[in-house]
Amino acid sequence: MENLKKFNVEICVGTACHLMGSNALVNMVENLSEDIKKHLNIKCSLCFGNCNKEQIPPIVKVNGITYTSVTPEKLKEIILSCLEGIK
Amino acid sequence: MRRFVLNNVIKYKRMLYMEIIKSYKKGELKEELPKIPKKLIPDISGEGRSRVFYEREILKEKIKFVLGLDYKKVKDLELYEIANHIEEIVDSTSPILAKKPELGVIKDVCNDCPGGRYYVTDLCRNCIAHPCMEVCPRNAILNAGNRAYIDYNKCIGCGLCASACPYNAIIKLERPCEKNCIPKAIGKSETSPVEVKYEKCTGCGACYIACPFGALEFPSQLLQVIHKLITGKKLIAIFAPSVVSQFGRKVSVPQFKKALKIMGFKEVFEVAIGADIVAREEAKHFIEHGGPMLTSCCPAYVNFVKSEFPDLVKYISPIESPMIVLARKLKENYSDHEIVFIGPCLAKKLEAFEKGLPEYVLTFEEIGVALAALQIEPAECEHDDLSEATGAAWGFAVSGGVSAAIKYYIKEVASEEKAESLNVTVANGLMECKLALEKLSNGKIDTDIIEGMACDGGCIAGPGVLADPRVAKSSLNMFIKSEVMK
Ligand code: FES
């Protein structure tokens, strides 16, 4: 098997993020094409603790970088630009 | 089934709740309250600046509902004035608190949407055939500026033009609130852009979900409940069967139960216990008295029958709803405790007000924001024990579930044959309720039971849910199979 370059997508599904729409993010990521998904390590995490530091949920970490107030469109853009980077 | 879309109206409302509870917990609510709109909607420069002020204004009015105030009394008050009364507001003694938890209209937020009229849109190609003009019985369509126009002095709103146009260029614009209100309890009046006819309002919350400006709200009791929890008062929580999956995929029902105890509730019970009692009693009632029987668990459906079909009220099952039945039962053993119902429903607030118990009604959304603001993560909680309740009782949460449960108990109290021969009509959503009740009233339907649910899909599609109703339905089925029937 070829050695795929992968990167981490951690979606917070803690209560605050859940209330602000993390579910739509998880659905979006799960419905990405296999071609994209094979490069992702998708993880649903519990509260990162960021929501109490005045950061607006839902919160996602992609390759360790924290993004706040994420929408499905925004997350897709982030993922696609990371993909560009590793190709 | 209701399509659930998490929009900005809902997001801002949730942020507002979280912000208010956080500052209450820090003991800073009095000082912080007037600053909250600006904090949630910060300044921006350049384009869209005026919008910032408008949105802050909306939040300012919404805060009054979050605090549980009587909007009629406080609509002209500024937040700093309200802040002066914050102690009495949180400990439930303030005279400006809402007594009856009914639908409130924020007139300043209402966009006064156009509605009820036909409009010719840009899609009009000014065609040569112009069937719109030909079919119009009042010659109300003119041709001006290279397209068709409607003369509203003549238009009678028949809609023939819209159906004749080959480009679908003519549409009827409807107000979202009016369109979704089946009893027609909301609309424009001579003096106001929007007004509620309270004698017709069932409290179902359809307009509240539909309004894209968030101009309709219900007063909350959340802050008062939190205050009691934090000050160690004796409260019991009871939660509706539609709870399954509401708090995300990682939270099980036993964990949610534990989280409520960590919040400070002394005891926590499933309303499914009450649903078992109700279904059994309704089965007995049906065997003794025969049909037709209208189910009584959905308060908006019951209100709808009462206001729109008074001659059918006699058919409503005399058994009270699972919430009330369980609350009464608990009062026998916990007379010094107050009871908080947690569910997907706004009409339950009215029901509880009318019956005098339970003392508080919160939605999943309200309890969700409280958990988030108090930093209690149900997914990290231990598993509490579930009480005994049948899968049939948990099924009350979904349209069709109540009649299925009655059928299940008819098998037990009468016979298999009796249950199998039962003729059930499931009315899913107030529109279907209306049609079924009309038929019953005209003698055009032969049915034993009309199960009515005001929300399309049942309780899992209620106005106070957090999860998509489709997800909630499949999770509930899985839960019944794996947890309840095991
Ligand atoms: S719930 Fe997502 S960061 Fe706290």
Image (cartoon, coloured by chain):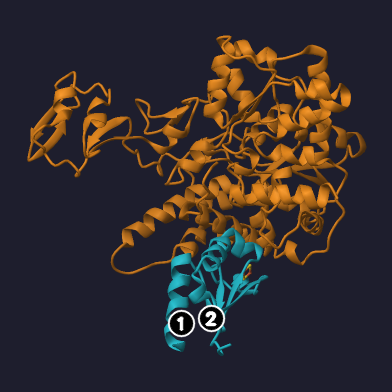
Chain colours: A cyan, B orange
Q: Is residue B435 visible?
A: yes
Circle 1 chain: A
In percent of the image, x 31 and y 62: which residue is there? Answer: B48
Question: Which label number is shown at residue A17?
Answer: none
Where residue B250 appears, as percent x and y from the top left, is 70, 63
Proximity of marks 2 and 1: CB atoms separated by less than 8 Å: yes
Where residue A75 appears, as percent x and y from the top left, is 48, 71
In percent of the image, x 45 and y 62: which residue is there? Answer: B41
B348 sits left or right of B2 in the view = right
- Structural crowding at the residue carrying mark 1, measured as other residues with C-alpha within 10 Å and reported as few (<14), some (14–19) or many (≥20): some
Circle 2 chain: A
B358 sits left or right of B51 in the view = right
- Residue position marked by numbered label 1 in the rendering: A83
Residue furthest toward the bottom?
A: A3
The quarter in which the N terminus of chain B is drawn is top right
Where residue B116 appears, as percent x and y from the top left, is 32, 30
Mark 1: secondary structure: helix
Rounded to the nearest angstrom, the CA distance separating label 2 from label 1 is 8 Å
Q: Give the quarter the ligand 1 occupies.
A: bottom right
What is the three-letter code of the residue carrying label 2?
His
Where residue B166 sits, quadrant-wise, is top left
In percent of the image, x 62 and y 40: which residue is there? Answer: B97
What is the three-letter code of the residue carrying label 1?
Leu
In percent of the image, x 50 and y 51: which residue is there? Answer: B5
Between B180 and B390, the residue placed more toward the observer is: B390
- Residue position marked by numbered label 2 in the rendering: A39
Q: Is residue B181 above or below residue B33?
A: above
